[in-house]
Each structure stands twice: as structure tokens, then as C-alpha cells.
Amino acid sequence: MRKSDAVLALDGVGSAKEKALKRLGIRTIEELINHFPRNYEERRLVNSLREVQDGESVSFEGLVVEEFRTAQVRGGLKLTKGKAASGSVVVDITFFNQPYIANSLKYGESYIFYGKIQQSGRRFQMTNPYFEESAKREFVEGIVPIYPLTSGMTQLTLSRLIRQSLLKLGAQEETLPDELIQQCCLMDLEKAYQNIHSPIDWEALGKAKHRLVFEELLCLSLGLVRLRNCRKQTGAVAYAFNDLTGFMSALPFSPTKAQINAIEDIARDVQLEVPMNRLLQGDVGSGKTVVATAGIYLTWKQGLQSAFMVPTDILARQHYKTLQELLKSYDIRIGLLTASLTAKEKREVKEKLKCGEIDLLIGTHAILSDAVQFANLSFVVTDEQHRFGVEQRASLLEKAGKERRPHVLVMSATPIPRTMALIIYGDLELSVLDQKPKNRKEVKTYLIGEDKRKRLNRFIDAQIDDGHGVYIVCPMVDESDTMELKSVLQYGAHLQESVFPHRTLAVLHGKLKAKEKETIMQGFMNREIDILVSTTVIEVGVDVPHASLMVIENADRFGLSQLHQLRGRVGRGEQQSYCVLLSESASQQSRERLKALVGSNDGFQLAEEDLKQRGPGDFFGARQHGLPSLKVSNLVDDMDVLAQARQVAIQICEEDSDLSQAKYSGLKRKVQVLFDEYGDSFN
Ligand code: ADP
Ligand code: MG
């Protein structure tokens, strides 16, 4: 058997199991053995139940001394009960709603049961235990892996399929060079796979994990170091002009100290031939756009082109307007490029761009298309950088041509710890906007239930009477789900007809044509629309300063960082703004999440809270930082391994930057797999 074989090659896998595996992202044997346990359970097989504490989970060997029988009780509940004897102890065993079990546990036969022992007086009980025939025991003793599952797939089946694969694969070829294994004291690959799936003991499991984490983070670092080296080899244009006094004094507001510092950082960087690589971190509403605009202005003064990439169509169109306004005193020619333009419009923009008749191109990832060529790209801004992958950002840099690199500014409201940012972006510099513009009032946040709906509606009316705009956001998990869309549309229609007939209301969602979205956004901006009912398409970046109220329906269905982003759509002007979270959820977890939001307006603090509540795996998932998704490692817990792996990656790249030596062939393939897979998920 080979790693590239399809899972159908395994005994016991037919089309149903194949489908279930596919739902877990598993098509090949290689993907199957890379499906790692999410947890482990130590199953201790005891000789005597008398030594076991009440409430302890153990395995014991028991002889069925009373036949298992099923009885129907109230509410359709089916109870299957029987008794098993272990020495002098008799255990009452009960299964809920699994009547078929009565047939698999035979009177007079011996089984190993695993479960939680409950003792009361002399009575021993176990409910819904896991069991195997004594003679064929597999998973009742030692450290047992617990895998992430999907419907149609059980722990037992999955564990067995993985064992079968490892057995049939036989000796696995080592991916790391011997000297590296020695140098870093790593477990060899085959042993690591054995022990991650069927650990001999905790120590071996620890070593197996370390080996696999190290390898994965080494591949990640190798990919990133190579991207960085590409960038470093060539220089950027050193700008001669860096006088910003005119630009600053023409701004419609006086910039905050933090904005001035960040702008000065950029003005300093672009004077050098070393390409700038700067991350601008600032909470929602801190005013990142104007900082980027300063760099664009300097680039234009130098007679060179800038590109400004944003994740959504709405945002591209909004920035197009904002930058036109901020730069209106200058003769800067601005172009817009999104997938939603007509073919003719696109062609025109591309032609102008190529012959240098556009100084600044604002657009979505449509900018990345091969057909888009710049005359002299020299300054690149990526807004809401976490929405893009590292490779997407890299391919934008290539637009500057082979001989030169652009200066790069990435902007984000997602706080990433500095050490991690360093590793992700290479040797980047950091500017932080830790101040909000003056005259901003904190957004007041309230958590309410349906009982307050009438009061909320009166409040909405009052806000509109005062000349403000109102957002009502409805959760839609999947922008392409027609059922969900229907309910949002129906809800909008209901509000318009029955609750706010005297107001203008529009519904904004991902399925609308770009032009329709723009008309609606424009109407809201111009105060022709009072209430904007929207899905999360407005989540990032949207800036309508007179909007003062953000109502979030079913708020418990959103994550904390997302809620904070949504709330960031208000409080962008001088008026007092409000965020109202509607939730009927009684779940402890979602209450805590929503209370955290009510209690804090600080994005950095909320991100930490989010990290605590969701765990690093989720929080720093690929969507958050644009990195390939990792299988065994997580960037928070494995930070020190990451630092070590990065050192090794730098060494390897110095020795053999293309990984062309035979000893690196296994590693090279793994780097490709890691980065490819991730490329797909972003296309
Ligand atoms: P974000 O950091 O979320 O991208 P924006 O750049 O969209 O924030 O700025 C938010 C709003 O604040 C915009 O309407 C912008 O014009 C305004 N703004 C930015 N800087 C200042 C400032 N120093 N004083 C007053 N308003 C500002
Ligand atoms: Mg922004």
C-alpha cells in the first residue's frame, strides 16, 4: 500500500465510509494517517473493582451473569439492562436507547467494559460503557486516541482504519535528514506515527507529538523564509521626497499622535532602498486608512504607482470614495478594480494601469490576476490583512516586476502577539494606533432579550429622528444558503411593513450584484436609507460616520472578535453610539461571550478573552492570520518549537535555498503540500 492510495483500498471501506471520511477531509491513506487524535484517554484495566473510587473511569473484565433486556419507559426512552460479575462484585449495567446492544452482549460470555464506576453502598453501576469481547480486546487498555468524528464514522472504525493503514504502509521513509534528527533529538517518523495513534506510554506520546509538530512548523518556516528571501534579494525605490506638511495640513481633521507617529514611520522607511515591510495594527475606528493614504501620497509625489488591496467589493468601493476625498487637492488618478466591473471597464482600467495613467489602484483580489500589470508599482497596501493568505500578499509584490520590490504596508485590527507576527511576516516592523480620534465617545453596549423588543423599536425611531443611521445585522452562517437568505429577506420585509412603515429600509446581503450593493451603501451614506438590514457583508471596514446604532440579532451566533468588528461600524462620528445585542440563548458560554463585549470596548482585550474562550486552535485558525492550516501544531502553545524550527529553516535555506539536495526531497514535498493545500482553500 502507498500513501497516495485512495481510502477505498482499505478493508472495510465502501462508498458510505468513503463519503464519511471525505467529510473529514480524508481521501487518501496519507490524509488518513494525518488525521490526528484531538485527545487521549487513559484506560486502566483493574483486577478488582474494590480498589476503584466512586466516579472513576476504568476498564474491568466482567462475565455477563444476567441477560441484557430492553424495556420501554416513559417518553419513549428505551433502557437496556443487565449484570456483569467481576470477582465478587456484580455491576448493574444500563444502556440508554441502544436496544440492539442486547444482542451483542451474550449471557455467560466475558467482556471488558470501560466507563465511569458509580458506587452507592454496596451497589456498583455503569451507564453506557464501551465494551469489547475479552478475547479480542483492542481499545480497553492503555492510552486510547480520541479522534474528531463526523456522522457515519465511529471512534472504533476510525481507529481501526488508521491502525490498518499504518500496518499496511509498513516502514515509512524518513522525511528529515539524519543529521537533523540527531541534532534536534527527534523521534523517527515511523515511530512518531505509531505513537501519535497508539501511544505506548505518555512519554512516547510526548516525543511523537514533538517530532510531528517540529516537522510541521519547519515546513511552515521553510515556506515563509523562502517567500521572505525572494523579497529581500531585490531593492525598492528610495524616495527622495518625504515632506508631508502640506498633506497633513490639508486633512479634514487633525490626526492623532498615534497616526502622526505611524505616518512618520512610513515616511522614514520609504527613503531607504530596503523595501519597507510594516504592519499597522489599530483597533476598529482608530483611523488606519489615512495613514496608508500618506504613503500613497508620497509615492505619487515620486511619480510612482500604489496598489490598495481590500477583501470585499463594498470596501473597495468605499475606499475608492474615501481616498478620492482625502486626495482631492492633488492630481492623483485613482482606478478601481473588482471582479464585479464589466469586461469593458476592467479592460480600460488595466490599459491605463499598464501605461502609467493610473497612480493608485484600489481593488479586491481581482488585482492579483495575471492580466493586471503595473507600469511602476512601488507601494502596496493590504487592508484587513487577516483576510488574505501570505501567498496572495506575495503575489501582489511580484507585480512590481523582477528588478524591484515595492514598499509594503499591511493593516489589521486583529491583534497578533508581536513574536508571532514576526514569525509570520518575517522581519517586519510594527506601528500601532493605540489611540482613537478625539471627540469619540465610547460605544454603549447592551444585551437584551425579546421582552425589550418594543422599547428597542422606539429607540431605533428616536435615533433616526435625531438624524442618525441604524444597522440591523442578522446572522447568516453561509452567504450562499438560500434558506437563510430567504429568512433575512422576509425579516427585512416584515420590519418595513409592520414595524417601520414610515422609514426607508433596505436589505444588504452577499448575493446582491455589486452595483446594487453600492447603490444601497450610497443611499445609507446619503441618509436616504434610515435602516440598513444586513448580513455580515458589512463586517469589515465599512465606514458610515453618522450611523449611531448597531443592532445584532441572535448575537450568540457570532464569535467575539466578529461582534467587536460589527460594533466597530458605529462610533465613527462624534455622536453617542450604541450597540444592542439581542439574544435568547441560555448557554453559559454564549452569555459569557456577550457579557465580555458589554464590558469592554478594547479590541485587544477582547481578542485575549476570545483566545481564552475558544482556545488557540480556533482563534489563530487560517482565517485569522492567512497561514496554511496546521494539523498537529498550534502557534500559541508551540511557540518555542516554532522559534527553533525557524532557526533551522534559516540554516537550511542558507545551505540550499531550493531544497535541491537529495536529503531534503521529503521535506521539499511536504512544504509544497502544506502551501498548496492552503492555496486551494483561498481561491
Ligand atoms: P479603521 O482603523 O477602522 O480602518 P478608518 O480609517 O475607517 O478606521 O477611520 C474611521 C473614521 O474616523 C473615518 O470616518 C475617518 O475619516 C475618521 N478619522 C480618522 N482619523 C481621524 C482623526 N484623527 N480625527 C477625526 N476623525 C478621524
Ligand atoms: Mg479600515
Image (cartoon, grey):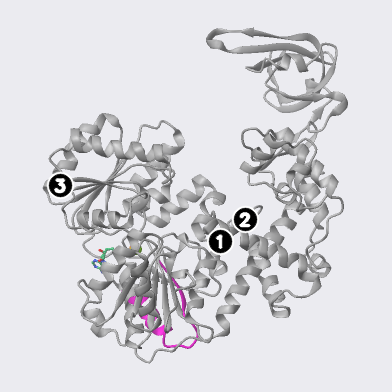
Label of residue 630 in the image: 2
Q: Is residue 255 visible?
A: no
Q: Residue at x 24, y 82 (%)?
A: 330
Q: 426 or 317, which lies in front?
A: 317
Sequence-wise first label, 1 or 3: 3
Q: Quadrant of ligand 2?
A: bottom left
Cα–Cα span, label 3 and label 2: 47 Å
Q: Residue at x 33, y 59 (%)?
A: 314
In magenta, the rendered stretch is: 260-281
Residue 2 part of the magenta segment? no
Left or right relative to 545: residue 311: right
| Above-or-below relation of 651 to 25 | below
Marks 1 & 3, CB-CB < 8 Å contact: no
Query: On the image, numbered disc 1 is attached to which residue?
Result: 627
Residue 264 part of the magenta segment? yes
Q: Secondary structure at mark 1?
A: loop
Sequence-wise first label, 3 or 2: 3
Cα–Cα span, label 1 and label 2: 8 Å
The answer to whether the residue bearing label 3 lies less than 8 angstroms from the nearest atom of ligand 1 is no
Q: Residue at x 83, y 13 (%)?
A: 88
